[in-house]
């Protein structure tokens, strides 16, 4: 949802913003991977803070991570249901919209209730589904590329650098909250 808004304002220079954001987020993901390799239990950043700085820092980071997880889950559910509105008009009904949101929350709770093995399975299925969707989008989209649809790479914004920097920071703040949750199901 967000990349389309950025593209609308920045034209093809939005690709530069996405690539810079991908590089930045990849570096942070590598830091989390290194952190996970140094810990034997599950717990992601909480476990590191607990081992490095003690119980109080671990508790504080654990509460913050839980709160961030709730916000991220809510944002992802709203994004999914908002996207579904454009395909299925039934989600324009507030009752159906909220019932679907609650059903997703209950589904995620049930998945987490059954432990790490099912979470790993769901993560793997989700990753494959995302990659297949991207592959289908690229293959089908390749047939709709026409030279006449391209506009200049540099947008007519007066202060182009600050626009790129602002969009990069916006994307980074959108994608970064997800990483503290990846190491949780990945412990030994």
Image: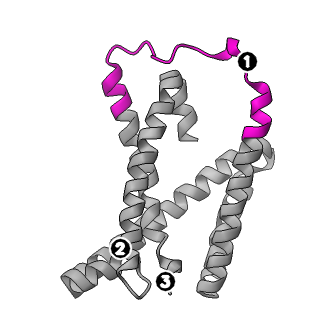
**Residue at the location (41% across, 73% down)?**
66
Residue 149 lies in the magenta-colored region: yes
Residues under numbered marks 3 and 2 in contact, where contact means CB atoms less than 8 Å apart: no
**Residue at the location (41% across, 81% down)?**
43
Where is residue 92? Give x, y as percent: 73, 46
Label 3: state its secondary structure: loop
The answer to whether one can see residue 186 in this image is yes
Q: Earlier in the sequence, mark 2 or mark 1?
A: 2
Q: Residues within 10 Å of mark 3 (few under 14, many from 20)?
A: some
Quadrant occupied by the N terminus: top right
Q: Residues within 10 Å of mark 2 (few under 14, many from 20)?
A: some
- List the residue tagged with mark 1: 146
Query: Observer-nearest residue: 66 or 163?
Result: 163
Q: Indicate left or right for 64 with 75 as reference.
A: left
The answer to whether one can see residue 103 in this image is no
- List the residue tagged with mark 3: 187
Q: Earlier in the sequence, mark 3 or mark 1?
A: 1
User: Which of the labelled discs sits on residue 35, or is there none?
Assistant: 2
Label 1: state its secondary structure: loop
Q: Earlier in the sequence, mark 3 or mark 2?
A: 2
**Residue at the location (40% across, 34% down)?**
167
Q: What colouring method underlies this structural image?
A: one colour
Where is residue 151? Give x, y as percent: 58, 14
Q: Residues within 10 Å of mark 1 (few under 14, many from 20)?
A: few
Q: Which residues are magenta?
A: 138-165
Distance of label 2 from label 1 (alpha carbons): 45 Å
Distance of label 3 from label 1 (alpha carbons): 47 Å
User: Which of the labelled discs sits on residue 34, or is there none?
Assistant: none
Q: Compared to 114, does 184 lie above or below?
A: above
Residue 105 lies in the magenta-colored region: no
């Amino acid at each position: 949802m967000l990349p389309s808004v950025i593209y609308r304002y920045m034209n093809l220079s939005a690709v530069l913003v996405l690539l810079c954001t991908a590089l930045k987020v990849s570096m942070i993901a590598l830091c989390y991977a290194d952190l996970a390799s140094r810990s034997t239990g599950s717990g992601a950043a909480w476990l590191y803070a607990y081992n490095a700085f003690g119980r109080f820092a671990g508790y504080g980071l654990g509460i913050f991570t839980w709160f961030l997880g709730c916000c991220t889950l809510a944002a992802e559910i709203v994004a999914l249901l908002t996207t579904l509105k454009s395909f299925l008009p039934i989600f324009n009904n507030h009752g159906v919209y909220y019932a679907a949101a609650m059903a997703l929350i209950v589904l995620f709770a049930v998945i987490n209730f059954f432990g790490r093995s099912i979470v790993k399975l769901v993560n793997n299925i989700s990753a494959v589904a995302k990659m297949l969707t991207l592959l289908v989008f690229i293959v089908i989209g390749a047939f709709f590329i026409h030279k006449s649809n391209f506009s200049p790479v540099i947008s007519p914004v007066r202060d182009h650098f600050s626009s790129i920097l602002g969009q990069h920071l916006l994307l980074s703040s959108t994608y970064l909250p997800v990483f503290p949750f990846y190491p949780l199901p990945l412990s030994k």
